[in-house]
Amino acid sequence: MRAVFALDAVVLMDAGADARAPGAAVTVALCGHWEHEPPCPLAPHHTTADHDRGEVRLRVLFAAEPEAEEEVRGRIRAALRRGRLDGPDGVTVRWQLRGVHPSEVRHDEQEQARRLARS
């Protein structure tokens, strides 16, 4: 049975850069492309990004079988460490990973967590 896990990361980006790019890179790492038919093949996930003066705080919730948790976390870390995404418009968005660490699913995320686990 799938469990839901959380991961927090901070990346540095230029002020005008698309803060959605690191989340899209996570989707590519987990699903093969940022545009795909549901469900996500390895780990249904949801990423939020808050951009504030060059610093982007990412929060990734994902549902996975417990034995796949480390593989999923590893793919997410690798995507963020890569520090770039070639967008659909041909523009490459770059960032620098400042930190990434596991986190707990928060109380206010419980409904989202249930949806991911059912996916």
Image: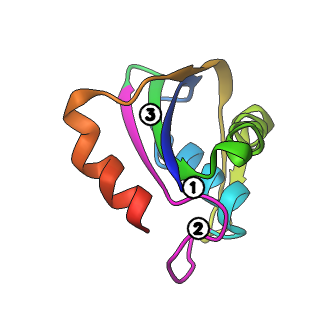
- Please state which amino acid type lies under the numbered disc 2: Trp
- Please state which amino acid type lies under the numbered disc 3: Arg
Sequence-wise, the earlier of marks 2 and 3 is 2
Taking the spot 74% from the left edge, 37% from the top edge, the residue there is: 70
Taking the spot 44% from the left edge, 26% from the top edge, the residue there is: 57
* Dot 2: element: loop
Q: Nearer the viewer, residue 52 or 102?
A: 102
- Disc 1 from disc 2: Cα separation: 6 Å
Magenta stretch, main secondary structure, is loop
Figure disc tally: 3
**Residue identifier under label 2:** 34
The numbered dot on residue 24 is 1
> Where does the magenta region start and end?
34-51
Q: Nearer the viewer, residue 71 or 53?
A: 71
**Residue identifier under label 3:** 59
- Disc 3 from disc 1: Cα separation: 13 Å
Residue 16, quarter of picture: top left
Labels 2 & 3 near each other (Cβ < 8 A): no
* Crowd around label 2: few <14 · some 14–19 · many ≥20 (10 Å): some
Q: Residue furthest front?
A: 1
Q: Position of residue 43 (x, y in %)?
A: 59, 58
Q: Nearer the viewer, residue 57 or 93?
A: 57
* Dot 3: element: strand
